[in-house]
Image: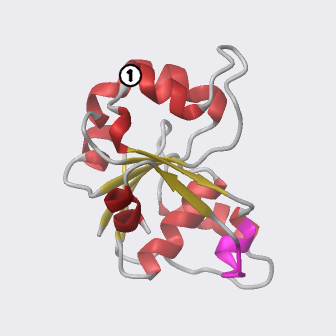
Amino acid sequence: MKIGIIGSGQFGSSLAYNFSNNGKKINLWNRTNINNEIILKKLNSLNNGKFIKKLNPNLKIKTRLNNVVNNVDIILVCIKAQSLFEFLKHNHSFFMDKPIVFCSKGIDSKYCLFQTEIGERFLNSKFFSVLSGPGFASDIIKQKPIALSLACNKENLGKKIQ
């Protein structure tokens, strides 16, 4: 499976790291220029005691949004809830008819909308899923047991994502 991850914060980076180590092809994007060294610093700050020296070659950092979402099976949106509305407003054309998993916590404070409600304003909602916790980036990096739930209104899509 090939996964596009939008947002290289702690949660997005930790998911990208673990998925790539489990044989998934990962494209990781952030609005600022990032590189392997920045991601490694972020991951090591979460991983008390165990030093990560390099990223799995399955994890590719991309600087162009279209290079992250083209030819992927699924897109995980791991950007701040407060940034989602503006992000989708300007970039929704990249995500049309692609399965999307919203991974960030919270409600947009400006518009008082859940992430899926924001998504419905810009995208095809039949491809939405939501990942919810509790799940913390530091526990994901340390490969501790966590309890994440996936909500999806399409059973076949939900099984594919799982």
Q: Taking 74 as reference, is 5 left or right? A: right
User: Which residue is outermost to the bottom?
Assistant: 50
Q: Is residue 136 left or right of residue 131?
A: right
**Residue 150 drawn at (x, y percent):** 54, 59
Q: Up-down: is 110 above or below 61?
A: above
In this view, 76 is above or below 42: above
Indicate the amino acid at tag 1.
Answer: Phe
Residue 116 among magenta residues? no
Task: Please state which of residues 3 and 147 is positioned toward the viewer in this rendering.
Answer: 147
Q: Name the image quarter holding residue 82.
A: top right
Query: What crowding class fits label 1: few (fewer than 14 Cα within 10 Å), some (14-19), or many (20 or more)?
Result: some
The residue sitting at the left extreme is: 71
Q: Which residue does the image show at 72% across and 85% down from the upper left?
A: 50
What residue is shown at x 70% (from left), y 59% (from top)? 133
State the residue lying farthest toward the top.
Answer: 110
Give the quadrant of the N terminus: bottom left
**Quadrant in the picture for the C terminus:** bottom left
User: Residue 75: where, in percent of width, then height?
Assistant: 38, 50
Left or right side of 113 for 99: left
Residue numbers of the magenta segment: 138-146
User: What residue is pinned by disc 1?
Assistant: 122
How many numbered markers are drawn? 1
Q: Position of residue 95 (x, y in %)?
A: 30, 36
Q: Position of residue 125 (x, y in %)?
A: 38, 34
Q: Nearer the viewer, residue 50 or 94?
A: 94
The question of residue 143 being in magenta is answered with yes
- Residue positioned most to the right: 48
Q: Residue at x 70, y 74 (%)?
A: 146
Q: Tag 1's secondary structure?
A: helix
In this picture, is 149 found above or below 98? below
Taking the spot 34% from the left edge, 55% from the top edge, the residue there is 74
As displayed, is residue 77 above or below residue 61? above
